[in-house]
Image (spheres, rainbow, N blue to C red):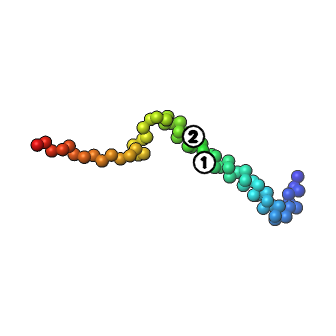
């Protein structure tokens, strides 16, 4: 059960690289993909964007009446 104690430094580094290759995509999916999916579910397509994303329109005063 404790055979891994006899591993050399390069075998340990290789195991860490393989483990990172598994955990990095999992962390990216949890941190990036799932929040974006939830954000897309809140706002169905076709609706206008929220005010902070909508283009700002300049408010001009009404023209003077002559």
The percent coordinates of residue 12 (x first, y second) are 80, 61
Give 66 or 8, whichever is nearer the viewer: 66
For numbered disc 1, what is the local secondary structure?
A: helix
Q: Nearer the viewer, residue 54 or 36?
A: 54
User: CA separation, marks 1 and 2?
Assistant: 11 Å
Q: Which mark is residue 39?
A: none
Q: Look at 49% across and 34% down and name the residue there.
A: 44
Q: Position of residue 10 (x, y in %)?
A: 81, 64
Query: In percent of the image, x 79 and y 59: which residue is there?
Result: 14
Q: Residue furthest left?
A: 66
Residue 35 is drawn in which quadrant? top right
Left/right placement of residue 19 relative to residue 51 reads right
Q: Residue furthest bottom?
A: 9
User: Image point 68% across, 52% down: which residue?
Assistant: 24
Q: Which mark is residue 37?
A: 2
Residue marked by disc 1 = 31
Depicted 16 relative to depicted 48: above or below? below
Q: Secondary structure at mark 2?
A: helix
In this rendering, the answer to whether 48 lies above or below 2 is above
Seen at 83% across and 61% down, the residue is 11
Q: Is residue 15 left or right of residue 66?
A: right
Side of 36 relative to 8 (left or right): left
Residue 20 in percent (x, y) is at 72, 55
Query: Residue 29 location in percent, x, y?
Result: 64, 46
Q: Earlier in the sequence, mark 1 or mark 2?
A: 1
Mark 1 or 2: in front is 2
């Amino acid at each position: 059960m404790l055979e891994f104690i006899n591993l050399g430094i390069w075998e340990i580094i290789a195991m860490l690289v393989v483990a990172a290759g598994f955990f990095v995509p999992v962390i990216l999916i949890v941190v990036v993909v799932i929040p974006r999916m939830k954000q897309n579910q809140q706002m169905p397509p076709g609706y206008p964007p929220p005010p902070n994303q909508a283009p700002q329109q300049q408010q001009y005063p009404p023209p003077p009446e002559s």
